Image: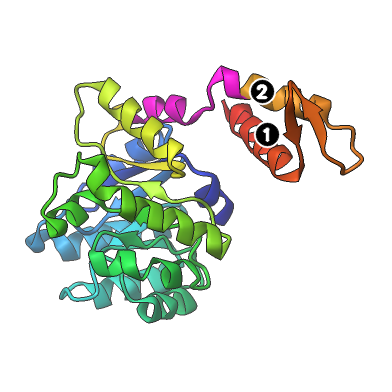
Amino acid sequence: MTLAIADARSFLFVPGNRPERFDKAAAAGADVVVIDLEDAVSPADKEAAREHAAAWLAAGNEAVVRINASDTDWHTDDVAMIIERGAAVMPAKASDPARLASIATQSKAPVIPLIETARGVLAAQEISAVDRVVRVAVGAIDLAAELSVSPDDRAALLAARSALVLAAAAAGIAAPIDGVTTALRDPSVLIDDVTYARRIGLTGKLCIHPAQINDVHRACAPPEADVAWARAVLDADDGSGSAVALDGHMIDAPVLTRARRILALADRG
């Protein structure tokens, strides 16, 4: 699943206390399903949700599991289940690189820290460098609440998102996943959010409803003009390794790398 997570555009949450929805979520077309043991589950249902997730994973199904934060009463049992099942894990409110390293070492599975606190943002470089951390995700709603700003205020959260983008690039892992868009009845809001996130370096999206998946995938696809540019760039490359010119612009190795990435995204459809 490591490669699927690294390349994934859409991550669909499904509440852990609703096992009847697990198969539906898996069939909805998302790149990755995330069984949620945290925000979507009330305290009274935490243990049952964990048991439902464990049973579904034991049946041979694949999912990332969002577990409760390390300062909660449920965290230890959540981690024990993850270790037993060898499931990919999304630790909520991740901020401690040492704790993440411990989980990764024991589970030997991919880790996607959900960074949704100021402390987590400031530790993003160390978190991204932890072995088996394949990607980080932005928890914009919780982070905005801690910062006393609106989660829809892009300017207020730009520094945090950019910090994760830089940390991921420095660690050599896949670009970050952006947080949820709560607007369910207006696809234009979601598409605009994804387009903005892509522009600043985030290449995936957390989803809270199956109806969001197709719009996320479309918004993650590069514009036709970018695809045409990328093809022209690769056509102009003479293979010598030396810089060449195209329409008055220099083409060198970094430009070729960008062009190849654009075409790889376009090929996904």
Left or right: residue 172 versus residue 59 is right
Q: Residue 268: x percent and y percent?
A: 59, 30
- Foreground pick, 187 / 208: 187
Residue 228 sits in which quadrant? Answer: top right
Residue furthest left in the image:
44
Residue at the limit of the structure toward the right, as seen here: 240
Q: Quadrant of residue 255?
A: top right
Instruction: Return the residue at label 1.
Output: 259
Does residue 213 sit above or below 87 in this rendering?
Answer: above
Which quadrant would the N terminus be assigned to in this image? Answer: bottom right
Task: Let me know if residue 217 is in the magenta part.
Answer: yes
Q: Residues within 10 Å of mark 1 (few under 14, many from 20)?
A: many
Q: Point out the tag, 2 or 1, that comes first from the N-terminus.
A: 2
The residue shown at (34%, 58%) is 65
On the image, numbered disc 2 is attached to which residue? 229
Q: Position of residue 116 (x, y in %)?
A: 25, 59
Q: Answer whether residue 149 is magenta in the image.
A: no
Q: Magenta span covers which residues?
A: 212-226
Residue type, numbered disc 2: Trp
Residue at x-position 55% and y-position 56%: 2
Q: Rounded to the nearest whole Å, what is the CA distance between mark 2 and mark 1?
A: 8 Å
In screen coordinates, is 20 left or right of 241?
left
> Can residue 121 be seen from the camera position used here?
yes
Q: Indicate the quadrant where residue 252 lies.
A: top right
Q: Of 218 and 72, which appears nearest the observer? A: 218
Dot 2 and dot 1 residues touching (CB under 8 Å): yes
The residue under the point 33% across, 27% down is 192
**Magenta portion: prevailing SS class:** helix
Amino acid type of disc 1?
A: Ala
Element at badge 2? helix
Query: Of the numbered discs in the image, which one, if any, rests on residue 153?
Result: none
